[in-house]
Amino acid sequence: MPSIFLYEFMLRALAGGVLVGMLAPTLGVFVVLRRFSLIADTLAHVALMGVAVGLATNTFPSVVALVAASLGAIIVEQLRSRGRLPGDMALAVVLYGSLAFAVVVIGIAGGFNVDLFSFLFGSILSVSPLDLWLLAGITVAVVLFVAVFFVDLAQIAFDDDLAHVNGVRTGALNLALAVLTGATITLSMRVVGVLLVGAMLVVPVMVGLRLARGLRAAMATAIVAGVISAIVGLTIAFYVDASAGGATVLTALGLLALAYLWIAVRRWRRRGRVGAPAPASPNGPPEHGHRHYR
C-alpha cells in the first residue's frame, strides 16, 4: 500500500480535495459563463478578512470567515442588482475594502503566523473531520440547488435580462448563487487556501468548456478535472513537501494546457485530412479537379 494511504490526515485531505474538486466546478460553470469570475477572488479576500478577524479575536476563524463571505456576497449582489454600481465596480469595491481591512487587522494582531498561512495557501495537516462534514454538507446543498434550478441557472448564465422576462426569479437565484459561492470558498480554504480557491472555481470549468459540448457535459468534465487536480495535486504536495493549494492549482493549469494541446492536435489533423490529395481512381486522375460519380 502506498505510504500516502497510511496517514489519517492524508486520507482526510484527499477526501476534502475530492469534495472541493466536485463542489467548486459545479458552481464555477455558472460563474464563468456570466463572466463573473472575479467574484471568486473578491469573496476569497472577504473570507481572508474574516479569518484575520477570527484569529485576532480568538474566535473560530472558519465561522467568522463564513459569515463574512456570506455578507460580502449579499452586498455585492445588492450593489449589482440595484444598479448602484456596475458588476465589476461592485466587486472591486468589496475586494479592495476587505483586503485593506484584513491588512489592518493582521498588522494589529502582530503579523502573519502559522495558522494564517494554512488558511492562505492550504495545508494537508489542517483538514479536520469537522471540515469534511461541513464540505460534505455544502456539497449536498449545492448539488440539490443546481439539480432543481439547472434550467433557470443556465438561462441566467447566458442572458440575465431574458431570463427575467421569461419569469425566472433572477434576483433570488443570483443571491443564492453568490452566497453558495462564498460558502464554497470559505469551506474549501483549508484544502486549497483562500488565495487559490478561486482558481478551482475557474480553471476546471475552462477545461470542461474546451473539451465538452453542451452545458451538462461541460459541467461533468469540469468536475472530473477538478477531482483529478485535487488528487494529483495533494499527492504531489505530500511526496515533495509542497504547498497543497499551489500543487492543486498547478495541476489544474496543467490539465488546461493539455486540453488546449488536444484541441490544437485535432485541428491540425483535420487540416491534414482536408488538404490531403484525393485517392487515385482506377480510371485515371479526375479531370479539372472534379470527382467522377457512377
Image (spheres, rainbow, N blue to C red):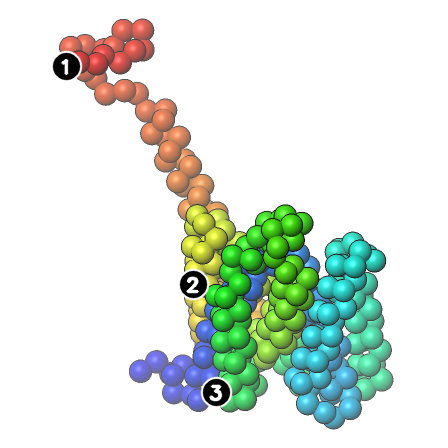
Tell me if 132 is positioned left or right of 61 in this view.
left
Q: Which residue is mark 3?
A: 9
Query: Which sits earlier in the primary sequence, circle 3 or circle 1?
Result: 3
Q: Amino acid at mark 3?
A: Phe
In depth, the one of 240 and 233 nearer the eye is: 233
In depth, the one of 103 and 236 nearer the eye is: 103
Q: Which residue is mark 1?
A: 282
Residue drawn at point x = 55 percent, y = 83 percent: 134
Q: Quadrant of residue 68?
A: bottom right
CA distance for labels 3 and 1: 70 Å
Can the viewer see residue 192?
Answer: yes
Image location (x, y in percent) of residue 5: 38, 83
Q: Quadrant of residue 290?
A: top left
Image height check: is 25 above or below 111?
Answer: above
Q: Amino acid at mark 1?
A: Pro
Q: Secondary structure at mark 3?
A: helix
Image location (x, y in percent) of residue 41: 68, 65
Q: Which residue is mark 2?
A: 224
